Each structure stands twice: as structure tokens, then as C-alpha cells.
Image (spheres, rainbow, N blue to C red):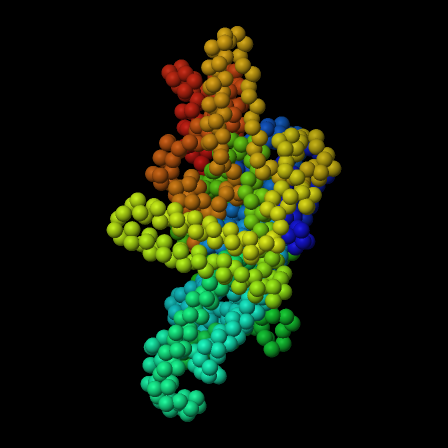
Amino acid sequence: MKPLTLGLVAAFISLPVVSFAAKDSVPTPDLRKAAARIDELVEKGLKEQGMKPNAAVDDATFLRRAYLDIAGRIPTIEEAEAFQSSTYEQKRERLIEDLLHSEAYVSHAYNFWADVLRINSGLGTGASQAEAAYQLWIKRALRDNRPYDEVVFDLVSARGLIWDNGAVGYYQRDRGMPLDNMSNTVRIFLGTRLECAQCHNHPFDKWTQMDYFKMAAFSYGMEANRYDSPNRDALSKWQRQDRNDFFQEALGVKDFPQIRNEEQLDRYTDSDNYQRYLDRYKMTDEEFRTMGKRSIDAYQSYDHESRAMRNATNELYKPIRYIAVGEREKTLKLPHDYKYSDAKPFDAVTAGTMFGEEIDLEHIDGSAIDAYAKWMTSPENPTFTKVIANRLWKRVFGMGIFEPVDELTDQTVVSNPELLAYLEDLMRGFDYDMKSYLQVLYNTKTYQRAADSREIEMGAPYYFAGPVLRRMSAEQIWDSIVALALPEADSYRPRLKGQLASVERVRQIYESLEGRSQDEYVAMVKELGEALESNMDKQEEVRKSLYEAREAEDNDRYQKAREELRDLQREMNQAVAKIGYQHTGEKVDGSDLLAAMGMSEMTMDAAAAMNMEGATKKERRKLQKAVLTNLPTPDMPEAPAGLDRQELKNWKAQQSNDLKTYRSLISQMARASELESPARRGHFLREFGQSDREVIENASDYASVPQALNLLNGSMVEALTNKFAVFGKRLNEASTPEEKTRMMFQAMLTREPTDHEMEIVKKEITENGEDAYEGVVWALLNTQQFLFVQ
């Protein structure tokens, strides 16, 4: 296995989960000073508005808020107990630091950036590997805490193959749409919306249509549709020569036009230059027409033979159509309806920046796209730092210092200009270290104040008496439920091996095709073309039969044709693999890829060890290169004493049925970051507002009838209360109704039930017995206390 693949595999190392064991690292005085300065500026802004800050929250509220905002889920009972029982004076600081360095943070942060960057599994046929590599690259960047400016530079300048550079997924996402990609780039990273200026001068901002096209010219040459293939180019050259030789032999006239059909022949004979052709080939009109018809016959004969080779080439490259991004020299021209006086329609556009320092393309080191990315991510760029400082502020507090966060104009209202300027300086001072920046924000008194539940009018500034009360995102709700149901949910990555294997498989195919000499390659394509010729002809006949059966509404004939077509396609794929990919080696195994990096598949014992209170740093490091890719079979409980044979048989049957139900319920459960991105329509995540990733930050937190029906009729309550689920097991182990009630409230709301709540649950149990617990779980899931970040 080559190092380039191992570089991709290296992206998936788990970090320790949260512990409150003694440790040396706490926020530095500088971080504390920065947090204090932010509080000072916020309180100054509040005072100017005649407002006061909200009261500080208690430990339980802070704990739940910090887990939801940083880890993306509610804390487990064990995590809550560890925090509440800790006597460490700075335990809030420690919790923030530990969460920011946890795998849970990576998962939650990935969801945030996936919405911003519109990371989408539906990139199209042949692009799933590019999307997988892109996902894993983003997670690696978050896990390694790479500086934000470096990440953006790598995205905007991304070139190469997906296993070398997963960042090329940024351009794969918008392949074939270079103008839209530029609009999204400027909106995400510079907080400016240029979309309207594509067709005319911006009606509500200062940007002109020329500004738009000058910016677009920088990245116009970034192509993701296919990669450069020396062997494929050699094949095209060979095919051209082979076609010329074929026509030369068939016609016996050197360089006679290769006329393909009657229409093309008529264009020659009706041309003003027709006499020149007759003179050149020393032919009469009749002789030229006769030779033209011979050319048509020759073309049809040659086309039948060459079509098989074209089909063979297409099939060979299907899996690797979208594995690379390259920069090509392409001239961007103004549209046909350009109407302004500074240029004419179809004029070539020279790249130019919309503000800030100009880029002198005549005197740059490297490529234009690198210069563009460097300009964009420069600390001197007028908006780059401002936008990320405000975007992350909104992520923490629920509102930006200016809104929208990606639409900066001359009319933008900034609620606290002095605070925003300080945050920009802070981001630059941290060299765009997002974790350090977030660590300061989470350690402010402002963040640790009571949430503000007042309704904020659209467009009105907010002065941050406390964070904004907001409903959990779809991912936070889902991940909280997953954490209640599954053991070690943060470490569980069921798709990881498959993603690794898919990327490695296309790398092997690429090297199989490009590793041949040009002569070997041409011979292979010819052999495959001959093998596929008959198959393709049969497929064409079957498709014709399929269409006829559909038109005639003959279902039996239609199904038979479909099955025949599937068989033919299976034969074709086998031929492609045998002839074209014969050097790709053994079947790719994701476990082997993990092992190649010294990584292992985590056992539940190892996962538990990572969560041990007294685990040493050395023990933790040993476990860091481990991932949980499969959930183990839960242990069967011991049978109650005193059962007779029939009762024991019935008890075992019930346990087996419960285990089967549990496996079915959790089969599609994992943290949202480890599922298809985004989830499919109808999935819990989509019902609760997960973005479709078609446009930037398109998620919704509005309540809806389908959400209520999902919680009422869905399988979540059953999954949680199943005795083999983490939550259900603890519920089953609690011996009294009081213990069960306390456990449910602690697990779901991170607090003890009140006396009044205890009485309500007690009454429910009295009336409905054991069935009452499912009702209580359903009720708690639907409470605002569960669904809101308070």
C-alpha cells in the first residue's frame, strides 16, 4: 500500500472522551483575560442600551448547555455525575477544554461545517468516493485543529487526486458550476453575496456585474469533471490514426474528407468551395458523390467497431470520473447580454479582486488560484477575519453581532462594533486557532448566563444579556437520543471502513489503468472492446424490448427484460474487472487499512478504559489509534431464580425477541456525522430540520406536525426503553419506581425530578403499571426542557 493512501487513513484517529481526572492543562491567564475583556465589552454595550446582563446559571444548566453546544449531545449520567461531584475549583474551565478536545466536538463541528460547505453524499454517479474523502478531510482538519485560514486556503486552492488531497471535494461539490462556486466561496468566507451581480449590477449593494466576473475569473479554470490521463490521451491519438488509416484503405484517396452521413455530403456539394474540393482531388461531381457515399459506408462500418472501444473506455473510467481537480487555462468571457459601458458582450475578463489589495497576475509566484486563496485568507483582507469571528460567535451565542453573518454591506448594523473589533484581533492573535477562540467564548460570564427567551425582531440588533434560547438542531436531538441508546456513541463509526475501502479501491483502479505502458493500455482497451461488443448489442436489443413492454403495459415482459438487462450489465462489469482492472490486487478490506496505520478496531473494553476516571495519559495515547466500527452483542441478563422449565423457556424466548428488536432498532443508529450526509428524506434528521445541503446553512429549527408524529409514532421510545439499550438497561436495573423516575430525569434532562414531577409519574405508574415508563420517556422527549438549549 502506498504512503499516499496511508495519509488518508491517518485522518481517523479517535481522541479521548471527557474525564475529570487530575491534569495539568487549564486555560492560560491570557485566555481568562480575553474572556474578561469580552464580558467587559458586552456589559458596556448593555449599559449603553439601559440593559443588564442575565443572572448566572447553575452547574446543571451549564453542564447540559456546554455538552449540547460543544459535544452536540446531552451528557450521559456518568458524565453528569463526574462533573457534579468534582470539587475542582475551575471545573467549568476543565469541562470546556476537555470537550473541545473530544471526538464528540469533531462530530458536532463537522455537522456545522457540513451545513456551511453543503457537503452532500448526492454528488452524483461516480463521485461518492470524492465525497467520502472530502468528509474525512474536513474531520481530520477539525480533529487536528488546523488553523482556519490554512483550511480555507487549502479548500480554495485544492488540486490533485482525492486520496492525496480530500479538499478537492470543495470543487467537486460544484463541478460544472464555476460561477456558482465563486458565489458560494465569497459568501462563506468573505460574508458577501454576489449572486445578484451575475446577471446585472447588484440592486442593493455596490457590486457590479464586472466585479462578479473579475472574481469568477480566478477560479474559472478549476475543473472537476475529469482528470488528465496520459494513457487515455494516447488512446485518443491512436484512435485518430487508426481511423485515418481505415479510411485511407477503404477509399484509396489520401486525405479525402471523412464524410459520415448524407447531410454532411450535401454540405460539401452545396458549399461555395465545392469546386476547390473537386480540383484538389481531381474528381468530377459524380466521382466525388460516389466517393462520399463510400465514405459514409466506411464510417458506419468503422463506427460499429470503434463504438465498442468507446463503450469500453467509458466503462473503465466510470468509477474514477471524479477523482481529481485540476487548474486549466480557461478564458472567462462576459455574457451575451452584458449591457454596461465598461466592456462589450463576449469580451475576455481579466481576474481582479473586489476589494482590498490587488493581485498582480503578471508577477506572482505560483498559480493564479494560489494567489487568489492567499489574498482571500490574508489577515489584511477587509472581511475574512470579521466573518469567521462573527460566525463562530453566533454558533456559541445563537445570534451574530451582525446579521446575517454572510451578508456584509455598507448598511449592515453591528450591535457592538468595539466587541467585533476585539474579536477580530483575538482571532488574528490566535493565528486562526478556532478551538482557542471558542474556548475563550465558552469561558465568558456572558456565555454562562441565563438564556434570553425574549423574541428578537428580524433585523433588530441583539446585545447579549445572555445566549439566545434556541431549539436543538436536528443533529443535537438525534445525537442525544443515540447517546442514550448506544454505548460509546462518540467513538462509533460504522461507515469508516467502507469509506476507506471505497477510496482505496478507486486508487487501485487508477493505478491499474495509468500504471500500464501506452502500448499495453491500447491493447487492453481493444481486448475489452471486443469482449463488450456483443454484450452492448444485446443490451441495446433488450432496452428496446423494455421500452416496448412499458408502452404496451406488459408487466411480465417488462420484468423479464429488466432481469435480462441486469444479467448483461453484470457480465459487462465482470469483463471490465477481469480485463481492465486485473492488476488491482486483492479485495480491499477496511480493517487492513486501519492496521496499516497501526490502528485497531476498538473493543468495548478499550472504549470503557478511555472513559476511566484514573486513566493515565500513556494509557489514553495507546487507545487513541482505535475506532469502534461495530457494536458488540449485549450480554444476556441472568434468568430470575425460581422459574420452572416452561417459565424459563418463555423467559429466554422473550429475551431473544427483545435482543432481535434492539438490533433492528439500532441498525441505522450512529451519530449524525457518521451517517449519509444529509440523511434521506423521511429520516428523523430531515423531519427535524436537517439541511438538505443544497444551499448554505439551510437547516431549520421550526416545529412541525411531522416532528410530533415522528416522536408519537416513531421507534425512538421503543429504542430507548429496550432492555438492551444503554438507557433501557439502566431503567430495567433500577429497583423501585422512585429510582426509575430519577434515572429517567437524570439521563434525559440532566437534573433530579421535582416532588411534583415525582407525584405525576407515580400516579401514571399506578394507573398503567410498567407500560407507564414508555409514556414518561415519550413525554420527556417532547418537553421544551429536552428539546431546547437553555
Q: Is residue 518 left or right of residue 457?
A: right
Q: In which quarter of the image is residue 335?
A: bottom left
Nearer the observer, 745 or 630: 630
Nearer the observer, 705 or 354: 705
Residue with the most extreme right position: 618
| Residue shown at 45% from the left, 36% from the top | 787
Q: Is residue 341 above or below residue 404?
A: below
Nearer the observer, 665 or 452: 665
| Residue shown at 48% from the left, 14% from the top | 649
| Residue shown at 50% from the left, 12% from the top | 648
Q: In this view, does 246 lie above or below 522?
A: below
Residue 634 appearing in the image: yes
Residue 447 appearing in the image: no
Residue with the most extreme left position: 552
Task: Pinpoint residue 354: horizontal percent, then vertical percent.
Answer: 51, 70
Task: Pinpoint residue 483: horizontal percent, then vertical percent.
Answer: 53, 34
Q: In this view, does 534 lie above or below 726?
A: below
Q: In this view, does 25 lie above or below 193?
A: above
Nearer the observer, 388 or 499: 499
Task: Pinpoint residue 251: horizontal percent, then vertical percent.
Answer: 44, 80
| Residue shown at 48% from the left, 27% from the top | 660
Q: Is residue 130 left or right of residue 585?
A: left
What is the tally of numbered marks visible in this picture? Answer: 0
Task: Pinpoint residue 673: horizontal percent, then vertical percent.
Answer: 52, 44
